[in-house]
Image (spheres, grey):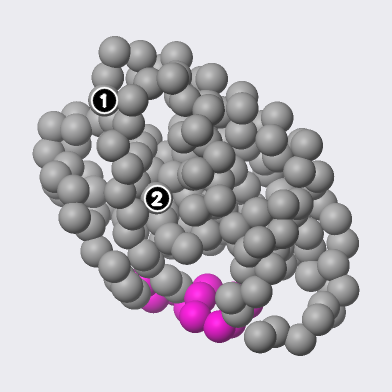
Amino acid sequence: MTAPKRLTLILTKEEISREVKRLAQEIDRDYQGKYPLFLGILKGCFVFMADLVRLLQVPVEIDFVSLSSYGSAKVSSGKIKVVQGLRSQIKGRDVLIIEDIVDTGITAGYFMNYLRRKKPASLKLCVLFDKPSRRQVHVPIDYLGFTVPDRFLVGYGLDCDGSFRHLPELYAIED
């Protein structure tokens, strides 16, 4: 377990809830009459994705992959490790990647390129938190919740070495 840290509130659970609801409405509008495949990138997406899909009216299929570029560090290694690979068929499907945060863009960019080679009918990205100040790889974000500051963030699925994912708000860790 990570030692206790000083946390500064960035977004309240009410602010996050409003934004997740807005994103669900946009997705419902855009995928009406379709049966999209939602691919969540674990572990960070699980809180956001669970809240998002419960608000949807369109039926969706759900799958997960586990990709890692951080390990126990606060900075991306730049190398993607596939911890749990893809199980769903992609070819001809409408695919929506669900990601908690895009920081450097390395993980999302890697995964999008990988999926494009599998020939989906459409491929889009839904991100709750975007940190463009750290971007190294451009990734098109189709559904965006919040642009966040360049700080190490935890809560609402985001962690620091496995801790703090359970917090219902978004916090910055102060060293």
Mark 2 residue crowding within 10 angstroms, few (<14) / some (14–19) / many (20+):
many
Towards the viewer: 172 or 17: 17
**Horizontal and vertical percent position of residue 148:** 71, 49
Q: Residue at x 55, y 40 (%)?
A: 51
Q: Is residue 109 visible?
A: no
Quadrant containing the N terminus is bottom right
Q: Residue at x 47, y 39 (%)?
A: 126
Q: Main secondary structure of the magenta part?
A: loop
Task: Give the magenta range.
Answer: 70-80
Task: Report helix, strand or loop for mark 1.
Answer: loop
Q: Is residue 79 above or below residue 154?
A: below
Q: Is residue 71 visible?
A: yes
Residue identified by numbered label 1: 35
Q: Is residue 112 above or below residue 143?
A: below
Q: Residue at x 50, y 53 (%)?
A: 45
Q: Is residue 45 above or below residue 91?
A: below
Residue identified by numbered label 2: 40
**Horizontal and vertical percent position of residue 60:** 32, 31
Towards the viewer: 131 or 15: 15
Q: Residue at x 85, y 67 (%)?
A: 7
Q: Type of residue at label 2? A: Gly
- Give the alpha-carbon distance from disc 2 to disc 1, as whole Å: 16 Å
User: Any magenta on residue 32?
Assistant: no
Q: Type of residue at label 1? A: Tyr
**Horizontal and vertical percent position of residue 36:** 29, 30
Task: Report helix, strand or loop for mark 2.
Answer: strand
Quadrant containing the C terminus is bottom right
